[in-house]
């Protein structure tokens, strides 16, 4: 076969490549008398051709144009810029990678393709055989030998590179969905943190193993099942609330499957973004790790507002049972710890692929941040152990159905309410030798609507009382925390400001029916309770308000604690109950404040300023729990704040990326 070589980029001349020999090795007997043209260009020229003829606005490594003639077989264009970049990442020479591109282009001219799995397998097998005859190794082989480390994890990651799971195939989407489910097991109540690291690391390895760029939407589609199934596995328990009240179940049960699908679609759209972006954006390995960690953290930050926000289970929460690691959130919050964990995972994958100096730099950088965070965490644990105790506090946990039989008459409604009051009194006083300075009842515990400043129950109990109740004012209904003194006077009435979408208000009007139509309160507040042992100040939080960073404490305020009243009856014994407790523990660490948590069905607890559960009542146990809290202090995270920390993370990522470019010149 006659081979015509056109050198348009003079930099090709320094490479000694026998183009005619390679092309002839790849031609079949049918085309041995044909002619082929090989044009050697750069990224600028091949970018133009790729956009003009394939509609793809980016450079590529090789383009083949079949002419459909038995003699004039076709034209092949090869870009030196892309070939050099890919050869460096693969740890091979430019001539070796060029040989692969010539063989690949020649097979395209002879009718071979790799769009479908079966076709791709045939084409790759042909390439491997031809290159072997030319003395080159299998370009698709397991490249574990390129890693400087021989650890089991590195071997596993490198083995993934040779797994024949084709992008856009059934098995691709099945495996990606499974990885999403696996990742969810790092959180409570399972706490298998290593599964989350495995799921994220494996997904990252799969999404970055192919250096060929694809469109953003194709990249999004490839990653979508991970986010969708990760979200459904984490949040399916939300739908358990439909079945708590029989009357509501009859009306809303039909929304169970659509609700689950909706969770999957929403989570897929949000949680797949980091993988989609990293697959779409063409970056060198070390750049990818930094970019991936920064984008993941930015998505976490954005979740605080999307549809009023739901920042549940940041990756940082998989460290809740590792005290020093978890307490690093006192320094940089869940955002910072998530950035470090994701960066460690991604940089480890890149390091296992190729032990470049820049990859070592990024991995050691994240490792150094991790160690610094642990030191800050240890310091927070020491400071949190300051034993300046609060007044004695009693938490009441009814642990009975929050829903009584729907009354059929006014008299029956009154009898039900009176019985609830008697029950609350018994639970607050039964078998207790000491009398508390403050009794905390959970959210929605009070059976009456508060319309004035009188609260008889606190007068009967003869102590300060905090209790969840609905309140009414100026035609509006609120989900409130009543703070009353022992004379029965309401001293403070705090109303929940961050309402639950679809549960407490209608974000889309009447399109999707919603059980509650409540009015939001005014937001952050500090409340003081006068006790015989001195004033006790606290920041109030109702239900899931406590999962939002910077949501509770006015800037400059230094309360003694946070009091969180909630009602998780809606979620039964599902993972949501245990994950909610971990979100509370996280807030204690970030803010440096102990938390008194009264949960209607459990888990109620006294939580230290270091996130440690001092004492607790398990789900389903009725009664009360006495205790104290201590160790309130200000943390770097509370001083700096969530949004400024996000800005620091982005600036740090940009600075490190610039530094990496200097290291890569030496690789």
Image (cartoon, rainbow, N blue to C red):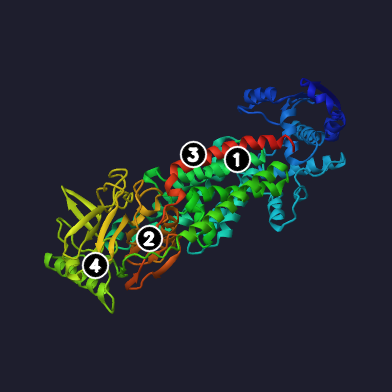
Q: Residue at x 73, y 46 (%)?
A: 355
Q: Secondary structure at mark 2?
A: strand
From the image, tell me which residue sits under label 1.
Answer: 279
From the image, tell me which residue sits under label 4.
Answer: 404
* Mark before the other along the chain sequence, 2 or 1: 1
Q: Position of residue 634 (x, y in %)?
A: 42, 52
Foreground pick, 167 / 544: 544
The image quadrant where one finds the N terminus is top right
From the image, tell me which residue sits under label 2.
Answer: 595
The residue carrying pointer 1 sits among few (fewer than 14), some (14 to 19) or many (20 or more) residues within 10 Å by Cα, namely many
* Label 2 close to label 4 by CB (< 8 Å): no
Name which quarter of the figure residue 112 lies in.
Answer: top right
Foreground pick, 27 / 319: 319
The image quadrant where one finds the C terminus is top right
Of labels 3 and 4, the one closer to you: 3
Q: Position of residue 295 (x, y in %)?
A: 53, 41
Q: Along the horizontal axis of the image, is 595 left or right of 297?
A: left
Q: Along the horizontal axis of the image, is 175 left or right of 665?
A: left
């Amino acid at each position: 076969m006659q081979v015509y070589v056109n050198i348009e980029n003079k930099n090709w001349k320094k490479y000694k490549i026998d183009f005619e020999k390679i092309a002839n090795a790849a031609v079949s007997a049918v085309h041995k008398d044909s002619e082929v043209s090989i044009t050697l260009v750069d990224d600028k020229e091949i970018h133009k051709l790729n956009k003009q003829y394939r509609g793809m606005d980016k450079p590529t490594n090789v383009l083949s144009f079949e002419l459909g003639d038995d003699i004039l077989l076709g034209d092949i264009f090869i870009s030196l810029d892309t070939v050099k970049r890919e050869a460096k990442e693969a740890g091979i020479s430019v001539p070796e990678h060029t040989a692969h591109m010539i063989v690949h282009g020649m097979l395209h001219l002879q009718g071979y393709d790799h769009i479908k799995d079966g076709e791709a397998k045939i084409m790759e097998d042909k390439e491997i055989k031809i290159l072997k005859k030319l003395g080159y190794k299998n370009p698709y082989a397991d490249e574990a030998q390129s890693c400087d480390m021989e650890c089991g994890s590195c071997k596993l990651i490198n083995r993934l590179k040779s797994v024949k799971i084709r992008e856009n195939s059934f098995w691709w989407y099945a495996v990606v969905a499974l990885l999403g489910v696996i990742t969810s097991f790092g959180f409570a109540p399972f706490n298998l943190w290593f599964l989350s690291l495995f799921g994220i690391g494996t997904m990252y390895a799969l999404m970055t193993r192919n250096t060929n760029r694809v469109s953003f939407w194709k990249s999004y589609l490839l990653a979508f099942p991970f986010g969708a199934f990760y979200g459904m596995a984490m949040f399916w328990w939300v739908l358990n609330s439909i079945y708590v009240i029989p009357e509501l179940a009859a009306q809303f049960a039909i929304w169970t499957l659509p609700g689950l699908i909706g969770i999957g679609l929403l989570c897929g759209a949000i949680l797949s973004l980091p993988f989609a972006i990293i697959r779409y954006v063409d970056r060198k390995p070390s750049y990818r790790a930094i970019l991936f960690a920064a984008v993941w953290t930015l998505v976490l930050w954005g979740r605080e507002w999307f549809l009023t926000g739901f920042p549940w289970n940041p990756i940082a929460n998989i460290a809740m049972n590792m005290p020093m690691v978890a307490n690093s959130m006192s320094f940089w919050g869940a955002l910072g710890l998530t950035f470090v964990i994701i960066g460690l995972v991604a940089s480890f994958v890149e390091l296992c692929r190729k032990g470049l100096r820049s990859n070592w730099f990024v991995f050691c950088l994240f490792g150094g941040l991790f160690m610094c965070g642990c030191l800050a965490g240890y310091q927070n644990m020491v400071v949190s152990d300051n034993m300046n105790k609060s007044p004695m506090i009693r938490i009441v946990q009814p642990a009975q159905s929050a829903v009584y039989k729907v009354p059929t008459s006014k008299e029956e409604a009154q009898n039900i309410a009176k019985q609830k009051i008697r029950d609350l009194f018994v639970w607050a006083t039964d078998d207790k030798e000491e009398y508390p300075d403050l009794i905390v009842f959970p959210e929605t515990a009070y059976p009456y609507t508060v319309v004035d400043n009188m609260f008889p129950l606190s007068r009967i109990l003869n102590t300060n009382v905090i209790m969840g109740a609905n309140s009414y004012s100026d035609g509006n209904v609120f989900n409130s925390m009543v703070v009353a003194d022992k004379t029965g006077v309401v001293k403070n009435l705090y109303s929940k400001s961050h309402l639950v979408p679809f549960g407490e208000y209608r974000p889309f009007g009447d399109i999707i029916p919603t059980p509650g139509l409540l009015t939001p309160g005014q937001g952050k507040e500090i409340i003081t309770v006068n006790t015989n042992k001195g004033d006790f100040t606290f920041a109030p939080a109702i239900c899931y308000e406590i999962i939002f960073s910077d949501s509770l404490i006015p800037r400059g305020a230094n309360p003694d604690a946070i009091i969180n009243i909630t009602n998780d009856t809606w979620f039964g014994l599902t993972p949501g109950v245990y994950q909610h407790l971990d979100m509370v523990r996280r807030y204690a660490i970030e803010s440096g404040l102990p938390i008194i948590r009264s949960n209607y069905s459990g888990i109620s607890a006294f939580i230290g300023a270091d996130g440690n559960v001092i004492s607790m009542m398990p789900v389903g146990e009725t009664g009360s729990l006495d205790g104290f809290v201590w160790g309130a202090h200000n943390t770097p995270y509370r001083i700096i704040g969530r949004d400024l920390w996000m800005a620091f993370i982005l600036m740090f990522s940009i600075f490190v990326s610039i530094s990496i470019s200097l290291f890569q010149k030496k690789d």
